[in-house]
Structures are given as C-alpha cells and as structure tokens.
Image (cartoon, rainbow, N blue to C red):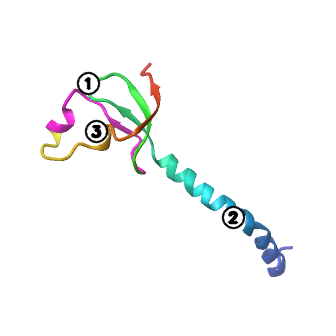
Amino acid sequence: MLTVETFGHFMEQLRPAGLVWGPTLLFLVIVGSMLDVVHLEGDHTSYLVLAPYPTLGLVHGGGEEGAFRRAHPGLAEPWWSRGDYLTLFELTDG
C-alpha cells in the first residue's frame, strides 16, 4: 500500500536521477526541435540539417529558384535560404 511515508521515500530515491535526466531530456528535446529537412530552391536535393534555433516546422524551402522572394517581397530571406544551418546528411527523393 502506498502511504505518505513510502511515497516520500520513493521521491527521495528518484531525486538524484531527476537531476541527471532532467537537463539531459531538455537538451534532447531542444536538439530534436532543431532537426529539419531543407529543400533548396531550384534543386532536387534535400538535406537533414540542424537549424540555428528550435523551429516548429520540419520541412522548409523548395520550389523554383527565387520563389520565396517573389512570394514575400521586401522580407529578409529565411535561414534555410541563406544557408544558416549545419548539414548533417544529404537525403534523396526516391
């Protein structure tokens, strides 16, 4: 039977493990949210990249050359168009 004393003892046993797993889990979540697939404009090659900051999207770019500039005149180019990422792997489309 779980009582207040046994629950407290159980939590004391988990506390040291939480100090190790908490920051590790946070690090893995942040790095996982920075993994993205980039399709370069005018190219059929895709790349698995590490974005410069956590993103909510997974796939970025694509289309014909200059598509982003025509669709969004006056805006600065996004990180995937500027090449502000670390390429991890080259992916194929087939």
Q: Amino acid at mark 2?
A: Gly
Give the residue drawn at x 47%, y 48%: 33
> What is the C-alpha distance between the residues marked 2 and 3?
40 Å
Identify which residue is drawn at 44% across, 22% down.
Answer: 92
What residue is at 30 percent from the left and 23 percent from the top? 43
**Residue 14 included in the magenta stretch of the image:** no
Q: Alpha-carbon distance for marks 1 and 2?
A: 47 Å
Q: Is residue 68 magenta?
A: yes
Name the residue rendered at 83%, 78% in the picture: 3
Taking 10 as reference, is 55 above or below it?
Answer: above
Furthest-bottom residue in this view: 4
Residue farthest along the top direction in this orientation: 94
Q: Nearer the viewer, residue 42 or 83?
A: 83
Q: Is residue 8 above or below residue 53?
A: below
Mark linked to residue 82: 3
If the image is split into quadrants, where does the N terminus sit?
A: bottom right
Tell me residue 73's x, y (percent): 13, 43
Q: Which residue is mark 2?
A: 18
Does 9 sit left or right of 58 as displayed? right
Q: Quadrant of the C terminus?
A: top left
Check residue 42 in the rendering and tell me which mark sits there, or answer none: 1
Q: Which span of residues is magenta-colored?
A: 54-70
SS under mark 2:
helix
* 76 relative to 16, above or below: above
**First reached walking from the N terminus: tag 2 or tag 3:** 2
- Estimate the x, y position of residue 19 in percent, counting from the top left: 68, 65
**Looking at the image, is mark 1 or mark 3 nearer the viewer?**
3
> Residue type at mark 1?
Gly
